[in-house]
């Protein structure tokens, strides 16, 4: 098992954001985590990557307990997080942003280097000497993904990669994620765009008010009118 989360709880100054959350991801899977605004999706990813400290429960990553571990320790083990809003460094060049991503590796070998990132996103190579801030939103998302790849992920977490992107750019980002997964990378994808996320993944978890409301095969969920109407409403 690549990731095994059991009974996770999190709160912000006493207000519960996650309760009894459990989830499992096998090596090689691409899994969606969907849910409405404020359901706790980002909080769950942040607990996994160490930027939010859970108040209870367990997170086992490749057999090691990481709940409460510092973010740099977690990323050094190969759990890499592409945060919501991308957080690239606008004053550094694209290539410098990518090279910074290598720091997360902490000496582990990586199956991804600059060449691989440039092959996946040729636009980044074309613009490699320009500042990050000159990129469009979609290109910044590609850069954020590329930077995480440079950290040698064994598990890649993505928080709403399609946010604010045009359908065309969203297609490009999703097809890059699917080709990474086809080549063996394990991915946990958080999306508000439920339909897209379900199309791209084999399994999905649905978070509602901080609790897991449903888990199953994405293909089943996508066709389940009741689940979609009830849990996802207009988002579907
Ligand atoms: N830093 C914070 N301080 C206080 N409350 C927070 C903080 N971050 C999130 N929350 C609250 O925790 C709950 C879960 O938020 P979270 O951001 O995890 O949801 P989400 O599913 O990612 O939502 P969205 O789809 O809007 O990104 C919400 O009620 C939110 O208001
Ligand atoms: Mg969020």
Image (spheres, rainbow, N blue to C red):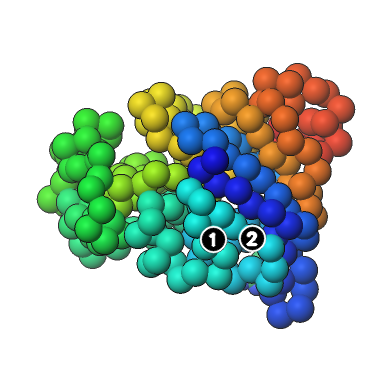
Q: Quadrant of the N terminus?
A: top right
- Proximity of marks 1 and 2: CB atoms separated by less than 8 Å: yes
Tell whether 121 sits left or right of 227. Answer: left
How many residues crowd around disc 2 within 10 Å: few (fewer than 14), some, or many (20 or more)? Answer: many
Residue 164 visible: no
Residue 86 or residue 156, whichever sits in front: 156
Quadrant of res 16: bottom right
Q: Secondary structure at mark 2?
A: strand
- Give the residue at mark 1: 65
Q: Position of residue 113 (x, y in %)?
A: 20, 42
Report the residue at 49% width, 69% height from top.
69
- Give the residue at mark 2: 58
Q: Secondary structure at mark 1?
A: strand
Q: What separation in Å lies between label 1 and label 2 (alpha carbons)?
A: 7 Å
Counting residues from the N terminus, which is met first, the one under dot 1 or under dot 2?
Answer: 2
Q: Position of residue 95 (x, y in %)?
A: 17, 51
Report the residue at 54% width, 61% height from top.
65
């Amino acid at each position: 098992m690549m990731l095994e989360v059991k009974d996770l709880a999190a709160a912000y100054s006493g207000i519960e954001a996650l309760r009894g959350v459990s989830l499992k991801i096998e090596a090689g899977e691409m899994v969606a985590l969907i849910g409405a605004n404020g359901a706790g999706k980002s909080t769950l990813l942040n607990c996994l990557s160490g930027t939010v400290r859970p108040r209870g429960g367990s997170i086992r990553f490749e057999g090691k307990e990481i709940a409460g571990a510092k973010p740099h320790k977690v990323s050094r083990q190969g759990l890499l997080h592409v945060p919501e809003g991308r957080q690239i460094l606008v004053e550094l060049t694209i290539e410098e942003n990518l090279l910074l991503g290598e720091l997360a590796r902490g000496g582990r070998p990586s199956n991804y280097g600059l060449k691989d990132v440039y092959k996946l996103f040729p636009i980044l190579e074309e613009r490699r000497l320009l500042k990050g801030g000159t990129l469009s939103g979609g290109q910044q998302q590609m850069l954020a993904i590329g930077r995480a790849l440079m950290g040698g992920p064994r598990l890649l977490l993505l928080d709403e990669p399609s946010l604010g992107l045009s359908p065309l750019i969203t297609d490009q980002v999703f097809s890059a994620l699917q080709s990474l997964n086809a080549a063996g990378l394990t991915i946990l994808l958080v999306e508000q765009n439920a339909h897209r996320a379900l199309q791209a993944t084999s399994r999905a978890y649905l978070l509602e008010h901080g609790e897991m409301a449903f888990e199953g095969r994405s293909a089943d969920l996508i066709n389940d009118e009741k689940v979609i109407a009830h849990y996802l409403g207009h988002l579907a």
